[in-house]
Amino acid sequence: MECIQRFTHRLLPLPPTVAQNCFNSVKRSPFRAYPAARFGLTRKPIFSPTSCYPRPGLTPDLTTRRSYGHSSRARAGWFLGIGKKEEELQEIVKAGDPVLHEPARDVAPEEIGSDRIRQIVDDMVKVMRKAPGVGLAAPQIGIPLKIIILEDTNEYIGYAPKEETKAQDRRPFDLLVILNPKLKKKGNKTALFFEGCLSVDGFRAVVERHLEVEVTGLDRDGQPIKVKASGWQARILQHECDHLEGTIYVDKMTSRTFRTVENLDLPLASGCPKLGVC
């Protein structure tokens, strides 16, 4: 989930002759090489071989006020420090990529604890923290496996107004890594709050979520894990588990609440439900 509002950086356009030469030198392919290939994973494309879709450009996916996008960092190297070589990380896949709209597969028992799965988890943690965000699902870096991570810190929470985090029942918690999570919604109480997603960068919408959930699964070492969560942590878990089913938050958003981050503080349209606990 997207944690901190992003800055945008504009680049000067290339001269027409330079731009034309660049584009003419690129051979377009109907399929791109998914990051999953480096881990020996394969997926069936849901489009015909004649269809084309662009390379993806990073979740937690919930809102606070400040964020730096992976692609924005790359484009604004002059701002972050010329000549500083950063570690190459997986890019966050953007909405429209099939990996975000198809169910992920379970991590097989023989894969759990393997170097490959550990590397995927390590990559996810680095990408999430660099975004920065409070949660990430493996499909968001192009890996169609049921793996989620989440973490919320005092620093992230400090970016949002205290009255907002109090209403959201948002508290810090340490890094959680869950393989093959199974989510159960507890009780009947729900809440309406804005959510964002690093795969739908720059936008927010109101989503109704249960206030309490229980998630079972395995940790990175294959040991059973059970998480009982409420408030904002419960929302993050529901958001990330949705990703594993091929669902993103806009599939569940409340009608007429979708907006850009710049308009996040504007009033909701007439007839929209009030934010808070239902």
Image: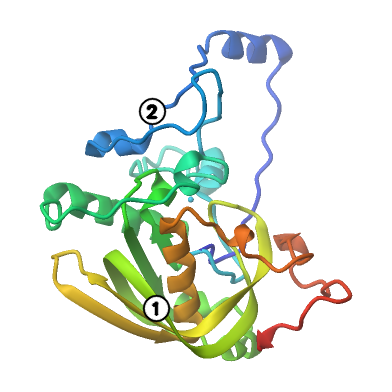
Name the quadrant containing residue 112. Answer: bottom left
- Please provide percent x and percent y for residue 13: 71, 26
Q: Which label lies toward us, 2 or 1?
A: 1
Could you tell me which secondary element the residue under label 1 belongs to?
Answer: strand
Residue at x 46%, y 58% (from the top left corner): 243
Q: Nearer the viewer, residue 151 or 70?
A: 151
Could you tell me which secondary element the residue under label 2 belongs to?
Answer: loop
In the rendered view of the protein, which quadrant contains the C terminus? bottom right
Q: How far separated are the C-alphas under marks 2 and 1?
A: 35 Å
**Whether residue 92 can be seen here:** no
Which amino acid type is shown beneath numbered disc 1? Lys
Residue beneath label 2, please? Answer: 33
Residue at x 64%, y 12% (from the top left corner): 18
Quick check: 86 left or right of 212?
left
User: Which residue reaches farthest right?
Assistant: 270
Name the quadrant containing residue 179. Answer: bottom left
Name the quadrant containing residue 172. Answer: bottom left
